[in-house]
Image (tube, rainbow, N blue to C red):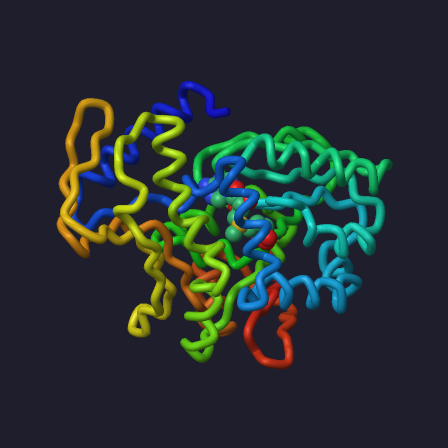
């Protein structure tokens, strides 16, 4: 359930998205309880290689990654989701002072924390339900321990270049004297990417369409659910997967007394998932003051986890 402030922000962002051309909205609005559940299903899909590949890297190299983080650290995870990927790190971290998972999807995060607490009873877990792109205060701000960050899932790929710099700038401040372990999805055969975002079971389509369904549930958006389809494709010049909701015909959406016309084929752009090279991302991170450290990649060269030393 959204707070009044969050509901107002969603309504304002959706009005603004529907008023502009081209139309686009932040992917953070995918993640209500239904959207978070659909994302968990995506992680299990045969076509969706990122979760499997990143988890295998964490399982294989968790000890080395934990060594970079050092003993007695406070671990902050951005966009923590189901908290599956942090476990191989926690299994190797020496005397972590606290674990702070940050996520916008509150009930989903709190349920995942309860499950983690059962398996790691001595860990101090201090969840923060917040938008990590906005100013936020860590619940452990006065606690001891060097801060280290973990940002898996290639979620950094959802950001536009200016947003990447702004997020990394914030993280460099928050993690000053520590470091950041970040997962990036690497540039690869577009056929592999296309399959990953157009799964045969249609789960990614349901995840994408949930944004409008959520707006109907929470904001009273009036639209015909049959009027939109999922569209995902690789934009090669910009090296990113784009996800859109494509209007199948001319139609009018109603939101809070406003009417928004869609022509046939017009889209609402819902997500980018940018693909990087390791060197390219290290260059971007250096602009925020992060120094390149060890890198772990799979044998296909599809995904990478990078250790970045904070200033
Ligand atoms: C692609 S999922 C990744 C989940 C998990 N870290 C993983 O690797 O499987 C993105 C996660 O980030 C959260 N999220 C997205 N935008 C956010 C924002 N602006 N602030 C906080 N959390 C956000 C979502 O709720 C979701 O749990």
Observer-nearest of 65 and 6: 6
User: At 79% from the left edge and 44% from the top edge, which residue is drawn?
Assistant: 96
Can residue 95 be seen here? The reply is: yes
Q: Position of residue 162 (x, y in %)?
A: 34, 53
Q: Is residue 55 left or right of residue 187?
A: right
Residue at the outermost front position: 226
Residue at the outermost top position: 4
Observer-nearest of 304 and 282: 304
Q: Position of residue 213 (x, y in %)?
A: 38, 37
Q: Quadrant of residue 145?
A: top right
Q: Is residue 86 left or right of residue 203?
A: right
User: At 36% from the left edge and 62% from the top edge, which residue is drawn?
Assistant: 232
Above or below: residue 90 compared with residue 33:
below
Above or below: residue 47 compared with residue 228:
below
Above or below: residue 108 compared with residue 66:
above
User: At 60% from the left edge and 44% from the top edge, which residue is drawn?
Assistant: 81
Number of numbered discs visible in the structure rendering: 0
User: At 39% from the left edge and 25% from the top edge, which residue is drawn?
Assistant: 7
Above or below: residue 3 compared with residue 59:
above
Q: Position of residue 159 (x, y in %)?
A: 40, 53
Observer-nearest of 190 and 137: 190
Q: Is residue 175 left or right of residue 246?
A: right
Can residue 161 be seen here? The reply is: no
Q: Position of residue 295 (x, y in %)?
A: 63, 70
Observer-nearest of 182 and 190: 190
């Amino acid at each position: 359930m959204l707070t009044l402030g969050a509901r107002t922000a969603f309504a304002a962002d959706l009005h603004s998205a529907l008023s502009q051309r081209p139309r686009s909205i932040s992917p953070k609005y995918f993640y209500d309880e239904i959207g978070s559940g659909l994302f968990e299903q995506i992680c299990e899909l045969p076509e969706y290689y990122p979760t499997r590949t990143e988890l295998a890297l964490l399982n294989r190299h968790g000890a080395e990654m934990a060594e970079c983080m050092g003993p007695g650290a406070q671990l902050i995870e951005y966009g923590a989701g189901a908290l599956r990927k942090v476990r191989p790190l926690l299994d190797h971290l020496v005397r972590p002072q606290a674990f702070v998972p940050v996520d916008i999807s509150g009930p989903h995060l709190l349920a995942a924390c309860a499950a983690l607490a059962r398996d790691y009873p001595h860990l101090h877990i201090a969840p923060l339900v917040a938008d990590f792109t906005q100013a936020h205060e860590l619940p452990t701000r006065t606690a001891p321990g060097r801060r280290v960050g973990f940002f898996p899932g290639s979620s950094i790929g959802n950001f536009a270049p200016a947003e990447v710099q702004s997020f990394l700038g914030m993280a460099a401040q928050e993690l000053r004297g520590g470091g950041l372990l970040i997962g990036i999805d690497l540039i690869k055969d577009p056929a592999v990417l296309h399959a990953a975002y157009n799964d045969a079971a249609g789960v990614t389509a349901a995840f994408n369409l949930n944004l409008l369904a959520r707006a109907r549930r929470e904001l009273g958006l009036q639209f015909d659910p049959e009027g939109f389809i999922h569209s995902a494709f690789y934009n090669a010049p910009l090296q990113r997967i784009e996800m859109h909701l494509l209007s199948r015909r001319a139609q009018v959406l109603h939101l809070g007394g406003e009417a928004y016309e869609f022509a046939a084929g017009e889209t609402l752009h819902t997500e980018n998932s940018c693909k990087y090279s390791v060197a390219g991302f290290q260059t971007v991170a250096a602009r925020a003051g992060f120094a390149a450290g060890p890198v772990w990649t799979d044998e296909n060269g599809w995904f990478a986890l990078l250790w970045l030393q904070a200033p």
